[in-house]
Amino acid sequence: MKKYLVPVLLCAAFFHASAAPAAEQPAMPDRIATAKKVRIAVNAGFPPMEMRDPTSNELIGFDIDFGNAIAAELGLETEWVDGAFEQMIPALVSKRVNLVMSGISDLPERRATADFIDYLKSGTQIYAMTEGPLSVPSDLCGYTATVSLGTSMPDDLKKWAQKTCDDNGRPPLKIILDNNLGQQIINLKQGRAQAAVQSLEGIDLIIEQEKGAMKLVGEPVHVTFQGIAFRKEDTVLRDAFFWAAKRKFEDGTYANLLEKWKLTTAAYPTPTINKDPE
C-alpha cells in the first residue's frame, strides 16, 4: 500500500543486541562481521509496522521489533535509517543501507534490483458492519464500498469487482473515495457505504477498536507479500537473515510480535525468498 512520506533519510536509531550468535549460523559478509551492525532503511509512517512513539520519538512497531530480533539472533546491532519511502530502494542500491525493512511489498518489478525475504501477508481486505447485509465478498455486488484515496486499493477493488460482479452478470459495485480512516468509518456507520477496504496490516486493530461492531468479510481480494529487501549481489547477508528469520518463526518470537501489534490476520507461515502469491 501507499505510505506517508517523511523527509529523506535523516534519522538513525540504534538497538544494541545482546544475544550471542548460534554456533550453526551461516557466514556473514566481512564488512558486516567487522562492523557488527547493519543499517536498515525504514519509513516511520506506517503504523503498526513502523512509527514514532509520540512521547519519546523513538522508532517502534512490528518491523522494528522483528528486525531487531533477527539481528540479535546474528549477534548484530541495528541502525534504523528513517527516510522517505521512495528513497529506500535507491539507498539500498547505492549502499547507503544494507537492507530495507519497512512494510515494502515483494513485487516482480522490484526484483530487478533487490531480493526479498517474505515474512508477512499483505493485501486488500473488505470489512463491514457486523449487522449489515454482507457475509462473503461477492455479496458486495450491487452495494457501495468506501476506499481510501492515495492507495492502490481502489484499483485492486475495481479489478475484483469487474471479475466478480460485472463478468458474472451481478449488479455493479459502486465505489466512493474517502480521505482517511476516520471518514471511512463514518461512511460505514452512517450507511453511505455497506463495506470498506483496508490493508491487512491495520485491519485487526480496526476490528478490535470497534468492539464487535465490525467484521472481516471473507479473504483478501488482492494479496501481496511484504519482504526484507537486499541487494541482488548481497546473497551472503540475505541468506544469514533468512536463517535467523526462520529461527524467530520457530521459537515463537514472530507469533508473539504479531499478537503484540495486532497483526495476526497478516500472519505468514514461514519465511520465503522472492515468492509470488498463488
Image (cartoon, rainbow, N blue to C red):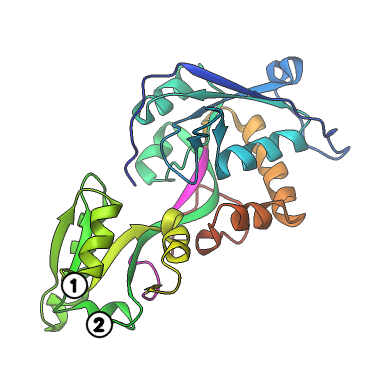
The circle drawn on residue 191 is 1
Q: Quadrant of residue 137?
A: bottom left
- Residue at 39 percent across and 46 percent down: it is 107
Residue 27, visible in the rendered structure = yes
Give the labeled residue for mark 2.
139
What residue sits 71% from the left and 51% below the top? Answer: 253
Q: Residue at x 25, y 82 (%)?
A: 139
Is residue 159 among what the camera can see?
no
Q: Which mark is residue 269?
A: none
**Where is residue 190, by image quadrant?**
bottom left
How crowded is the residue under tag 1: few (<14 C-alpha within 10 Å), some, or many (20+)? Answer: few
Q: Is residue 205 above or below residue 96?
A: below
Which of the two residues, 80 or 162, is positioned nearer the viewer here?
A: 80
Taking the image as shown, residue 223 lies to the left or right of residue 145, namely right
Foreground disc of the pair 1, 2: 1
Please state the extent of the stretch shown in magenta in the rendering: 217-228
Q: Residue at x 10, y 81 (%)?
A: 171
Q: Position of residue 207 (x, y in %)?
A: 43, 66
Q: Does the magenta run of residues contain 226?
A: yes
First-in-chain label (1 vs 2):
2
Residue 168 or 39: which is nearer the viewer? 39
Quadrant in which residue 20 is drawn = top right
Q: CA distance from mark 1 to mark 2?
A: 16 Å
Quadrant where the C terminus is found in the figure:
bottom left
**Cβ atoms at labels 1 and 2 below 8 Å apart:** no
Q: Give the camera-side residue of 184 and 216.
A: 184
Q: Residue furthest front?
A: 55
Please state the horizontal and vertical placement of residue 272, each as a whole percent of the image. 58, 51
Q: Secondary structure at mark 2?
A: helix
Instruction: Say if the magenta span includes residue 177.
Output: no
Q: In this rendering, would 93 be left or right of 12?
A: left
